[in-house]
Amino acid sequence: MAPKPDAKLLRAPTEHLPFNDKSFDVVVSTLVLCTVDDQPRAPREVRRVLRPGGKLLFIEHVRSDDEKVARWQDRLLPLNVRLMHGCHCNRPTLDGIRAAGFEVTQLEHGTITHAPPFVRPLIVGVALNAGGFVKSPLFVAIVLVATSLGVIVPVLKDSNNISSSFGQLVIAAASIADFGAIILFSLFFSRRGSTSLAGTLILLGVFGLVLVLVGFAIAGFEHSTSLSRVLQGLQDTTAPSPTRATDPPRRGNHRPVVVRVTRTAYGRALSDGRGFALYRFSQDRLRSSTCYAPCAAAWPPYLVSKRPSAAGPGANAGLVGAVRRADGGLQVTYAGHPLYYYVGDRHRREVLCQGVTKFGGKWYVVAPDGSAIA
């Protein structure tokens, strides 16, 4: 008897795949992208778990190219979503795949037989994860050249800066950026098979010319310094960078706990002290959470190390509390409702999952009085 395949079945939302970056060679998507809640995010998440050069094999509903059929797809969408398990057959799915950074290498337009006309349009194809950092070598090359010129020209205009260790480091960094730009230009043309022998020689010639020019520039410095002094000069002129506003919210309590009110696209709603939106779950009972793995992977609970005692502007301190979860964590509550983050909200005041149905209930941001903003 043939051995059983070693496979693991895991249920998880496509927008939040519980896998490390670059984990798979192939991902298969069959009538998936029409049902996900956040279609722009889903193919980006698929691309994240694919290795560079990995393939997405897809069979998906798509918006019809026939304007008449497309209008019927829009009109019958509410009915189709209800009857067909959330299927949005009018989505421009192919555009979403390309917008996520995939390069569509094979594509066929077909139809689903024995189906109503408005759900028949279908696309079947293969999309390639073109790579990680270098999404478009030509674009990155242009950015590198522009950036290097933008920092090197002011330094060259000021002889004092040229002779300083920091100025030398700036010129060296700009030169390295130029080298990288040349390499990326070469990658761009070679990927399209248009690089002839003459083109390759021209690229090598430009590369050599840049090397010579940089060599003359470095040799002409009147006050040359060692690498250690260059690095020391950079250290002396560089201040520690502050925490970025786009950093993800902290899940622990490394600072005083504050629940405040922030203005969002859905009106005034609760947020943590940094301005990241907080949600409540319709399936939760008062002072009791029902959201655990894998639910808690998508909506992490707002956990603290001690009971909160403060409320920020607009929030009612008397409504702020905490409840002990079944997994041992202490979760912040407001008016008795456990509070959660949404893992996709990466910016302050951002609300990407308002009114979404997942894990048996709906997720809402919270009004200042503790009610759900529907």
Image: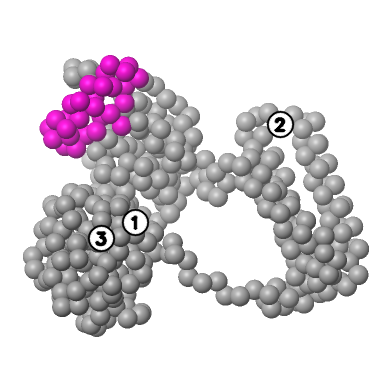
Q: Nearer the viewer, mark 1 or mark 2?
A: 1
Query: Over which residues does the magenta segment extend?
Result: 63-91
Q: Is residue 32 magenta?
A: no
Q: Amino acid at mark 1?
A: Glu
Question: Do labels 3 and 1 touch, CB within 8 Å?
Answer: no
- Indicate which disc residue 350 carries: 1
- Residue 104 lies left or right of residue 62; in this view the side is right
- Indicate which disc residue 295 carries: none
Residue 157 image offset from top left, x and y in percent: 82, 60
CA neighbours of label 1 inside 10 A, class few (<14), some (14 to 19), many (20+): some
CA neighbours of label 3 inside 10 A, class few (<14), some (14 to 19), many (20+): some
Task: Give the image quarter of residue 73.
Answer: top left
Q: Residue at x 61, y 42 (%)?
A: 139
Q: Secondary structure at mark 1?
A: loop
Is residue 109 visible in the rendered image? The answer is yes
Pick out the residue farthest to the left: 285
User: Which of the two discs, 1 and 2, labels the residue nearer the N terminus?
Assistant: 2
User: Which of the two discs, 3 and 2, labels the residue nearer the N terminus?
Assistant: 2
Colouring used for the render = one colour
Q: Amino acid at mark 2?
A: Thr
Mark 3 and mark 1: Cα distance apart in space: 12 Å
